[in-house]
């Protein structure tokens, strides 16, 4: 898209974001007082800067990476420039076990990047271009300040980057199947399929979250199905950003890991699959196993399973799982590992 076309489009977006309220049922209502021309101009400039901060991310994982089984070897998504040095914030699964990463600023403008951090606890990843990134830095907002009917903008980067209007329909804790749990995840609608690493902005062009998932329960597990996206809130980044830059991960990521992928339904947690070369695979856990207790603590949800697993000072410890397989109770003992020590890296690194 030409620069002129982008400017025209962002002017329309400024008018849209300033002139409407997104109602609870998804309807659009006009604001009581139309914005002035000066307000529209300021808004267009803020959104232009926000959109320009979003870049494409293209990563290729090392050949023997275990994450290829689920994520594939070649991964494409987005990232957001967050400081004057060209540091790029993205979703971590795009760059985990990567041997090569490029930042895509335009169709013919691609620069190589290095992985600065991958943080399993938050889900964030950080990249740094190996040459200067000619893009403005996004301004950081506060994800905790979003109001339910506030109009938001989702932006993806790269050659096929796009913009769309969205609203937040819920904010809640989220537990992923892959031993992942965060507080305050943001759920938006309508759904975007190019969500990986996409940026969620407010009407002032402030960054609120980083795209992670396409979900079918944006309203929550006990509500009517509604397709949408889950965003990791930037409020989780602020306390750990310095750690990520200095250590490559937050201290919270040094915790026990089993390599389990589980699903929860009506309070029952079952194994979906195990990660290749993981403690769970070595212990013989199988798809369909019902996890009843962990270390003697009853399991009634993914969050309880993970929080009990992560207790203790050492990431490597003995973990006892009581399961039911084929109607028969069993006890399985595993030796957990530090997830960061299991990740493959390019030769020589």
Image (tube, helix red, strand yellow):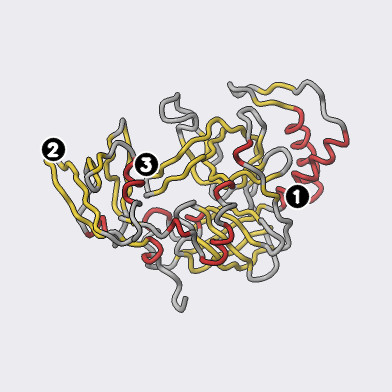
- Give the number of the mark in front: 1 or 3: 3
Q: Residues within 10 Å of mark 2 (few under 14, many from 20)?
A: few
Q: Which label's residue is closer to the chain start, 1 or 3?
A: 1
Tell me the number on the disc at residue 303: 3
In the image as oriented, which residue stretches furthest toward the bottom?
348
Q: Which label's residue is closer to the chain start, 3 or 2?
A: 3
Please state the horizontal and vertical placement of residue 105, each as a whole percent of the image: 67, 59
Please state the horizontal and vertical placement of residue 198, each as a whole percent of the image: 59, 47
Q: Quadrant of residue 301?
A: top left
Q: Which residue is mark 2?
A: 327
Please state the horizontal and vertical placement of residue 338, each as a whole percent of the image: 36, 62
User: What residue lies at 61% left-to-right and 29% top-to-bottom?
Assistant: 148
Please, what secondary structure does the residue beneath circle 2 have? loop
Tell me the number on the disc at residue 257: none
Rounded to the nearest angstrom, the CA distance separating label 1 from label 3 is: 38 Å
Rounded to the nearest angstrom, the CA distance separating label 1 from label 2 is: 58 Å
């Amino acid at each position: 898209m030409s620069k002129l076309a982008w400017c025209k489009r962002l002017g329309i977006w400024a008018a849209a974001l300033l002139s409407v309220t997104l109602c609870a049922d998804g309807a659009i209502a006009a604001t009581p007082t139309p914005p002035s021309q000066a307000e529209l101009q300021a808004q267009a400039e803020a959104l232009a800067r926000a959109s320009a901060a979003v870049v494409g991310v293209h990563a290729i994982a090392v050949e023997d990476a275990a994450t290829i089984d689920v994520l594939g070897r070649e991964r494409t998504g987005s990232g957001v420039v967050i400081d004057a040095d060209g540091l790029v914030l993205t979703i971590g699964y795009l760059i985990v076990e990567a041997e090569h990463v490029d930042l895509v600023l335009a169709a013919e403008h691609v620069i190589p990047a290095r992985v600065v951090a991958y943080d399993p606890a938050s889900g964030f990843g950080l990249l740094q271009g190996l040459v200067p990134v000619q893009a403005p830095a996004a301004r950081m907002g506060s994800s905790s300040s979003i109001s339910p009917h506030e109009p938001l903008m989702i932006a993806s980067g790269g050659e096929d980057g796009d913009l769309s209007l969205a609203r937040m329909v819920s904010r809640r804790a989220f537990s992923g199947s892959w031993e992942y749990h965060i507080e305050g995840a943001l759920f938006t609608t309508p759904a975007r399929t190019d969500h990986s690493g996409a940026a969620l902005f407010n009407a002032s062009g402030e960054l609120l979250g980083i795209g992670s998932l396409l979900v079918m329960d944006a309203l929550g597990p006990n509500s009517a199905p509604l397709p949408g996206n889950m965003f990791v809130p930037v409020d989780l980044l602020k306390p750990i950003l310095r750690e990520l830059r200095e250590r490559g991960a937050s201290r919270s990521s040094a915790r026990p890991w089993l390599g389990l992928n589980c699903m929860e339904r009506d309070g029952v947690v079952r194994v979906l699959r195990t990660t290749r070369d993981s403690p769970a695979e070595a212990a013989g856990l199988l798809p369909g196993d019902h996890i009843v207790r962990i270390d003697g603590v009853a399991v009634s949800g993914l969050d309880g399973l993970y929080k009990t697993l992560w207790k203790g000072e050492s990431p490597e410890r003995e973990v006892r799982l009581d399961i039911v397989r084929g109607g028969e109770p069993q006890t399985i003992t595993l030796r957990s590992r530090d997830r960061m020590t299991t990740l493959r890296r390019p030769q020589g690194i």
